[in-house]
Structure formats: structure tokens, C-alpha cells
Amino acid sequence: MCTPTCGHHCCTCRTTASTFAERLDRHATEPGFELVLGYDGEVPVGYAYGNTIEAGDRYWKRMTEPLPEGYTEAPALAIKEIGVRSPWRGTGAARRIHDELLRRRLEGRVTLLVNPLAGDGKVQRLYETWGYQAFNAQQPSPDSPRLTAMIRPIH
């Protein structure tokens, strides 16, 4: 499922279920993987997942600009996907799911990638209200858009 609130590059490429499943299978094997599902009663409304990244992780190596010395020394949580079903967008569900993902994490910082064009910039502005600040950019593949890398303290 690809939604405008997921903030990942999938928002411009119309991810298929099989592509999403392949990506999820790959991400689930990474260190510190955690997934949170959000429900309204018994109805699933959204999800978020991520994993721990350390110095030398390809996440850091893909940044378009050099990072300051020591920037990657401490582990961080990289949120790989956030998605919310249409009827629950704008209800705060994404923030609650996001906060639940962070609640028990031990890393000091959390980072995510956002397509700055998603929702005409609305998704990036939403993440800014959650305390994220842009610090760099990535272009994961030649056909993907340039993504804004954002970061904030976990707690």
C-alpha cells in the first residue's frame, strides 16, 4: 500500500504489493527491526517500521553531501515506512503510530526520508511539526526522486 503520508520515495512510484513485500522482507532482516500496526478497534489503519543504523550503514553512505565528522558514531533509528489508510488521514493516527514506534527505542536519534514533493510539501511540513529537521538528501536510485533526509531526537 502506498499512501501520501508514508513520506518515502514510494509516493511517486506507485509501489505494487509484491515490491512492498520484497522491501519489507529485506528490511525485516536488518538489525533492530521493529514494526508497529495501528488499529481503530479491530480495523487496521496504518503502520510504521524501521531499524537501527550504525556508522558505516549504507543509509549514511547514500547521503548526497558529506556528513560532519562523528555524525554517525551513535546508533540511530531509521524509519523506513509510515503509512495510513485514507479514512484515517488527518486524524493524528500517523503521529500516534510513529510515537509508539519510538516509545521503547534506545537510540538517541531518529531519521527518515521524505519526498519533498509529496502532498505538495505537506508531508515534510508535517514531519517538521513532529520535531524533524532536514539535514541532507538521498537519491536511492537513478529513477527515484531526491529525498530529504530529516532527523530529530527520539525522546
Image: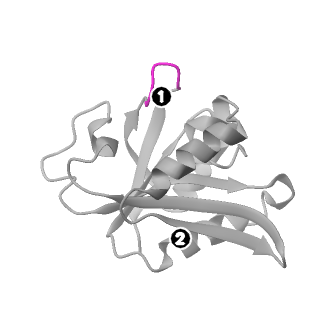
**Which kind of residue does numbered mark 1 sit on?**
Arg
State the CA–CA distance, disc 1 to disc 2: 25 Å
**Which kind of residue does numbered mark 2 sit on?**
Leu
**Residue under the point 46% across and 38% down:** 148
- Res 121 visible: no
Considering only vertical position in the picture, is 103 above or below 64?
below
Residue 116 is situated, as x and y percent measured from the top left of the image, at 56, 36
- Taking the view exactly as shown, the residue that stands out farthest to the right is 87
- Residue position for label 1: 146
Residue 92 is situated, as x and y percent measured from the top left of the image, at 72, 67
- Residue position for label 2: 101
Q: Look at the numbered disc 2 and give the secondary structure of its residue.
A: helix
Q: Look at the numbered disc 1 and give the secondary structure of its residue.
A: loop
In front of the other: 109 or 127:
109
Residue 41 is situated, as x and y percent measured from the top left of the image, at 84, 79
- Taking the view exactly as shown, the residue that stands out farthest to the top is 142
- Res 50 visible: yes
Considering only vertical position in the picture, is 116 above or below 39?
above
Q: Which residues are magenta?
A: 140-144
Going by the image, does 99 lie left or right of 67?
A: right
